[in-house]
Image (cartoon, rainbow, N blue to C red):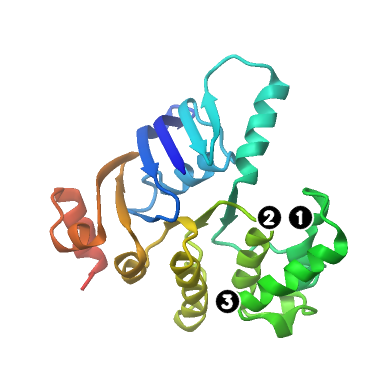
């Protein structure tokens, strides 16, 4: 489902990703952990083309973008759009449209981007709000929702584009513990249903419980990867051990 080869990304003179390689099968859940500033979020943003890598290639569900190659701008934009359509992304901040209801936030992209019939989009939107436990909040505006409810609307909005891969960039870091659990419950459900997922998180229990594979990022490189029982139970890399001691995984 996902193949990343030798992905390099710099911001000015600061190299953030140093030749990342990653493969992921359909239905796999991968969790990225590591200290702040180690490149995890940049990696996700490159995957869905919010950032353009300097070199390397990204394939998602059969769509491949190769960075650093000479091609027409139109062809490049077409590939970027196709790849972006394969991925749904949920951010740390909810980024909902404040002037639209929860249902309108969910249905706008399918109607505008995918040209979905408005009535069909509304049916889909209500189904997705029900999926995240918010069917009674369809007509509520973001200001009338808690942070956890807003994040669940954001998840429904991403799912409305019917992506093949879901990307989560620290989706619970802005929430207090009770609201965090609401969002993690929805994410667990998606993983259990077989959605191909990559999650950047400091929620170590979620990583331990739900990941098929855990990648430890350090200074723009994948320092260690493996199943959670190996990463948390017997990490081989000294930096991984130091990090896990600091976050006190039990």
The dot on residue 127 is none
Image position of 118 (left or right of 41): right
Q: Nearer the viewer, mark 2 or mark 3?
A: 2
Using a 10 Å C-alpha cutoff, classify the residue at mark 1 as few (fewer than 14 neighbours), some (14 to 19) or many (20 or more): some
Using a 10 Å C-alpha cutoff, classify the residue at mark 2 as few (fewer than 14 neighbours), some (14 to 19) or many (20 or more): many
SS label for mark 1: helix
User: Which residue matches tag 2?
Assistant: 161
Q: Residue furthest top?
A: 70
Q: Foreground: 98 or 124?
A: 124
User: Which residue matches tag 1?
Assistant: 109
Q: Residue furthest right?
A: 118
Q: CA distance from mark 3 to mark 1?
A: 21 Å
Residue drawn at (50%, 30%) of the image: 53
Residue drawn at (64%, 72%) of the image: 150
**Is the residue under label 2 in contact with that under label 1 (CB below 8 Å)?**
yes
Residue drawn at (44%, 68%) of the image: 192
Using a 10 Å C-alpha cutoff, classify the residue at mark 3 as few (fewer than 14 neighbours), some (14 to 19) or many (20 or more): many
- The quarter of the picture where residue 242 lies is bottom left
Q: Nearer the viewer, mark 3 or mark 1?
A: 1
SS label for mark 3: helix
Q: Quadrant of the C terminus?
A: bottom left
User: Which residue matches tag 3?
Assistant: 148
- Tell me if residue 79 comes above or below residue 153 in the rendering: above
**Is the residue under label 1 in contact with that under label 3 (CB below 8 Å)?**
no
* Position in image of residue 222 (x %, y %): 30, 42
**Is the residue under label 3 in contact with that under label 2 (CB below 8 Å)?**
no
Residue drawn at (22%, 61%) of the image: 244
- Tell me if residue 70 comes above or below residue 140 in the rendering: above
* Position in image of residue 98 (x %, y %): 77, 67
Image position of 243 (left or right of 159): left
Q: CA distance from mark 2 to mark 3?
A: 21 Å
């Amino acid at each position: 489902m996902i193949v990343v080869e030798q992905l390099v990304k710099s911001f000015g003179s600061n190299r953030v990703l140093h030749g990342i390689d990653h493969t992921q099968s359909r239905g796999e859940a991968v969790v990225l952990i590591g200290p702040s500033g180690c490149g995890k979020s940049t990696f996700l943003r490159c995957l869905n083309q919010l950032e353009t890598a300097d070199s390397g290639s990204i394939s998602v569900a059969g769509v491949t973008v190769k960075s650093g190659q000479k091609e027409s701008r139109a062809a490049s934009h077409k590939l970027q759009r196709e790849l972006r359509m394969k991925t749904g992304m949920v951010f740390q901040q909810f980024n909902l449209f404040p002037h639209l209801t929860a249902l309108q936030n969910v249905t706008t992209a399918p109607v505008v981007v995918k040209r979905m019939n408005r009535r069909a989009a509304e049916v889909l939107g209500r189904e997705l709000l029900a999926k995240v436990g918010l069917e009674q909040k369809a007509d509520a505006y973001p200001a009338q929702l808690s942070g956890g409810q807003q994040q669940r609307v954001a998840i429904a909005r991403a799912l409305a584009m019917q992506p093949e891969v879901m990307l989560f960039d620290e989706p619970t870091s802005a929430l207090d513990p009770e609201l965090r659990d609401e969002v993690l419950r929805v994410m667990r459900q998606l993983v259990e249903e077989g959605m191909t997922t990559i999650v950047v998180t400091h929620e170590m229990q979620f990583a331990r419980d739900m990941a098929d594979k855990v990648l430890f990022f350090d200074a723009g490189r994948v320092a260690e990867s493996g199943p959670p029982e190996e990463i948390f139970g017997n990490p081989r890399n000294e930096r991984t051990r130091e990090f896990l001691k600091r976050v006190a995984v039990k």
